[in-house]
Image (cartoon, rainbow, N blue to C red):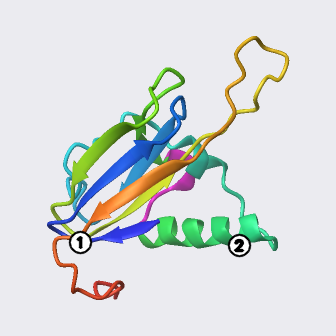
């Protein structure tokens, strides 16, 4: 979850390649992030389950955020970025036109270890280019 403000830019990077990602925008204006028109179910968000462990706690925070933005978890949508053929270093850039919370998730299906071309889950990097670097983080929270 990344809170961003109008004028910022963000880039999602498939650092090692072949790692699908999903980007969901939570904002009062669905056009708050240019080029982030949903085209797929937000599979990671739809599977989140709150619980007492570390993963469950993080999931609970995200589910609370979805509820605050009146997003039904079972109907959450995302723009799908990258796929299992993406080269290392593939990038997707977005301009933030209005304040928004951006959720970036990496679906990690089980890896077939006996296959001829195993594809382990890998990290996705998000670079934020702030329009107003002096603006304190969290300044837009209500």
Q: Which residue is mark 1?
A: 5
Residue 68 in the image: state x and y as whole percent.
45, 73
Residue drawn at (66%, 38%) of the image:
121
> Looking at the image, which is closer to me, 3 or 41?
3
Expressed as whole percent of the image width and height from the top left, the position of residue 120 reads: 69, 33
Question: Which x, y percent locates residue 62?
Answer: 56, 66
Q: Name the residue at 78% across, 69% down.
A: 51
Tell which residue pokes out farthest to the top in this image.
116
The residue labelled by disc 2 is 57
Q: Quadrant of the C terminus?
A: bottom left
State which region is magenta: 70-75
Percent x, y of residue 38: 35, 40
Marks 2/1 in contact by CB < 8 Å: the verdict is: no
Say which residue appears at 57% left-offset and 47% top-offset.
123
Give the mark nearest the N terminus, 2 or 1: 1
Confirm whether the magenta stretch covers residue 5: no
In the figure, is residue 113 to the left or right of 73? Answer: right
């Amino acid at each position: 979850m990344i809170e961003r403000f109008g004028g910022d830019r963000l880039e999602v990077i498939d650092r090692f390649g072949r790692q699908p990602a999903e980007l969901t925008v939570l904002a009062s204006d669905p056009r708050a992030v240019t080029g982030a028109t949903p085209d797929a179910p937000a599979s990671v968000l739809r599977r989140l389950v709150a619980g007492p462990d570390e993963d469950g706690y993080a999931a609970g925070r995200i589910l609370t955020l979805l509820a605050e933005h009146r997003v039904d978890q079972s109907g959450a949508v995302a723009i799908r970025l990258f796929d299992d053929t993406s080269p290392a270093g593939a990038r997707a850039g977005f301009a933030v036109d209005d304040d928004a919370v951006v959720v970036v998730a990496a679906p990690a299906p089980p890896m077939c270890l006996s296959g001829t071309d195993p594809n382990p889950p890998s990290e996705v990097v998000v670079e934020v280019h702030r329009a107003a670097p002096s603006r304190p983080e969290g300044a837009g929270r209500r």
